[in-house]
Amino acid sequence: MSSDPLPWLYLGKHPELCQNTTFVDVDYPTLMHNKLGIVDKTEELKVLLPKLTKTNADSGLLASSDPYVAVGCDLYNVEVLGHILQDHLRIGDSSVAVLLVSEVSTAYMERGAAQRVLEWAATLSDVRFCLLEQHLPDGVAHPFAETMLAHFEKLKTPLTAVGTMPEMKRRFSDAGWPDAGIDIRSLWELWSDPTFLTAEQRRSLDKVEAFDEWEEFALFASHYFLLLAERKADQDWSNRPYRASLAGSTSRLSLSSSPGIADSPIPDVPQEQPLQCPELPGKHVSRRFAALVPATSEISEGEAVGLLGGYGAQERLTDCDTFSRTEDLLPIQGPPMRTGIMCHTVTRLGATSNCIMTGGRTSPDKATAECWIRSDGMWRRAQSLPEGRYRHCAVPLKLPTAPRPGHTVLLFGGKTSEGHVLDEWLLWMGESGWRTINVAGDAPPARFGAAMITDSREGVSGVLIGGMTSAGRVLNDFWHWHLEADMTLHCRNVTARASAVLRSNATILGRFGAQLVRTNRGILMIGGICGGRILTSQDEILNMKTLRTHPVHGKRPLFIGASITDVDGGIIVLGGGANCFSFGTYWNKPSILTDDPEASLRCGWHLLTTQRPESGMAQSWDVPDRSFQTQQQYQQSNGHMSQGPSDLRLPEPTRIPRRSLSQGVDFEPVVNEGKPVVFSDGDIGPCTTMWSNSYLKEAIGFDRKVVVHSTQNETMDFKNKNFNYVTQDLGAFLDNCAGGAKLYLRSLSRNAPSDQPTNLADDYPEIAADFELPGELIYVVENLHSSPLRISGPVTMWLHYDVMANVLCQVRGRKRLLLYPPSDVSHLGFDAGASSSSLDVFNVAPAMRKHLVNTHPYEAILEPGDILFIPPMWVHTAAPTEGMSVAVNIFFRNLQQNTYAAGRDVYGNRDLGAYERGRKDIERIVKSFDNLPADVSGFYLERLANELLEKARAVAQTSQLHTMYAELS
């Protein structure tokens, strides 16, 4: 109820929303007098409160005007507050709707007093309670919670009523609020929810200031919740669906469909052996987001490790800590960098002490492309990356080259100075620098902050897990990759298999900022953040071999920005910590992760020294490095040669044939043949000459509201949502398009946009008579589904397919279309169940060229009056070649009615019923293997997948469509 700026924001910026509304500001009497004094001295505030009258009382009702009431009252006396509001505003009357807004108020109160506030609020007839407060998702021992609570204790304002979200929900329920009327979610869950914040809204964070404090933001947002409770005297809440909170669940909590059960323990969640993390004795240097450096010589292997760079107590660091278990070792030094960096990588080359440092950043908008190699103990500049990046992945590879193996580094992803998130794979080629690697099959989407490791210490395959998109969402996926002899990378998405094992705990798989560490227990994924909720002491460490968690007992470090490696006797955790916003900074002390509580005393590991780099130790970058065999040697030794991505020649599009309607066309056989055709001399009515912007504004109305796609990009991407839906006046939209704005209108049903397909005659009757289909296309009208109007500025449509056949009638402007036959779908980046792809076929990125080599593109340039027939399942995209484009798109059914999925299909692209049922069958098949070991279930599922693929190929080979594709190609 302490809503400080709320009245001024709404009265000043949105007065139209404040009709019949009174803002009530409640605070301690002294503070309310101070606020009123500020209002008196601030003309901009005074004008918002006409006829503000003060009472001259010391407490109680202090001032009032039509839109604002000031009350000085201690919430411990909630009965007094109730009497004041009833006397002045009749707040308890059934005709008065009340919204109570409380931002970290009741958390300071004793729990009993805070509960009385909730109970009093529940007595009102028509009330909503919006509460923002702290909570403890992992108890008081979590490092962030510990720092937060200590901060308020230090201020002598302890959070006496803070607890968990399930507890808070129960408190509201106990106070008389209906269970189904209480919705509570953490701020991190709300951030991760696309229905609460759009991708573009999340991206806008970078427009204010380049941002990279994601782990700290997630910790903060995970410790705050937003609760909205509703109660109305005559409201029946029994049928309201309950939405369980993801953030309220942990590995010991259930996502239940029933309220009140969401925090019940699950006794049968399998876990690995618990671990402890005792601190190492001795001094330490505070740093986070540093990089581990191997010992300077092979003799010191296992006896020392360095920690280079990172962010220190006040600045980014250039120095290097040497941690050792003995005293007589040479200190480890870093390269002579010009400035301190963080979020970089250091990768060891084989079993030697040689290593290579790549990338990193100073500030989030200043990534570096510099690379340094240490060879025989000396650092020298190596060839720079094609583009600066940070939070990328880097792993060592051992290529079976002759006459001796080649040790190199594979890089993936990262974020650039401009904020672009990369999907690029790079391989270090020694003296030749960095080479982009092509991806065959599915390609992991762009990401930064992912975790990657090789399957074995020396090999050419590994896994990639998690990371974050450009829109600030944590990816929950799991990929296996393998570098082939022809230097292509084969990637396979194995998320479903891992999720089937983790089941309801699958959210802990995809992480941002996690560490993958090879240990004698298997590969462990440690720390980082996941989407929607906090990682707890129960599930912060995941064994990738068993997909079971290692709970951590006792005091533990904050596994954020830490550097972790396996040593004799355990796993040492060096550096790390987080800025807990205004609460202070939490710094880890060096510790050892082990099942032996005495390990820290016996292992002998300690900080030996901290060494600044010496500028004289660097050599010129052009000193030849012989630790790596060339790409050509690798390919020749395996009997293969390959082309780089820029050498790959993409197939030339085939021009779609044009046919004349004037000579008569039987359209139904054209549809059955399943080939795209352009009809170039059909009469589609006077629209081609009449539909100017001025005519459309006058005929339809300048003020007609339309919902359009708005983007800053040349190409819209439905999958990654790089656009916003905005509502504009039609006239303004047309003017903006003419001015070059990247806008796109695909008309919707005026009366039921979510339920009914659009029809030009119903939704734009003012101009419908200007458009007509040639009589030869009567088959389209007889089987009509919808007829959307499409108007766009200079923006390209995303790659997609439609399940229904359609004809695209170009009215104004010229448009270029690329189409691909259904047999090409596996090359075009479609996720399972998706009808849209992020692949930009007009501007193919080098890493994507490999995908398109085996496709069979078709091309059409549409002029005003042209009609393009697009068969079902033909993948296509369109780009205007000049200015604006106006078209009418008519969808129609050409398959038997019972083949289409039952239910609503607004856009004509809902997949066929057989496909939807088939996907459910796949889920059931996968689930039937749940109780088997992962390797056994994987063995049989892959055999079933191969069998299904063989049958699909057999069907395709006997089909008329397949024969047609072969002839055309």
Image (cartoon, rainbow, N blue to C red):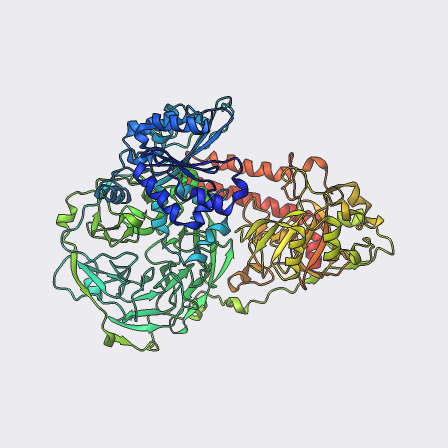
Looking at the image, which is closer to me, 185 or 89? 89
Residue 457 position, x and y percent, is 32, 56
Name of the residue lying farthest toward the right:
663
Location of residue 861 by image quarter: bottom right
Q: Is residue 938 left or right of residue 679?
A: left
Location of residue 376 by image quarter: bottom left
Q: Is residue 936 left or right of residue 715?
A: left
Looking at the rendered image, the quarter that the C terminus falls into is bottom right
Q: How many marks?
A: 0
Looking at the rendered image, the quarter that the N terminus falls into is top left
Residue 245 position, x and y percent, is 42, 35
Looking at the image, which is closer to me, 314 or 346? 314
Residue 712 position, x and y percent, is 55, 58
Q: Is residue 304 left or right of residue 868?
A: left
388, above or below 139, in the image: below
Looking at the image, which is closer to me, 759 or 249? 759
Residue 675 in view here: no
Residue 312 in view here: yes
239, above or below 419, in the image: above
164, above or below 683, in the image: above
Residue 165 position, x and y percent, is 36, 34
Location of residue 883 by image quarter: bottom right
Residue located 48% across and 66% down the image = 640
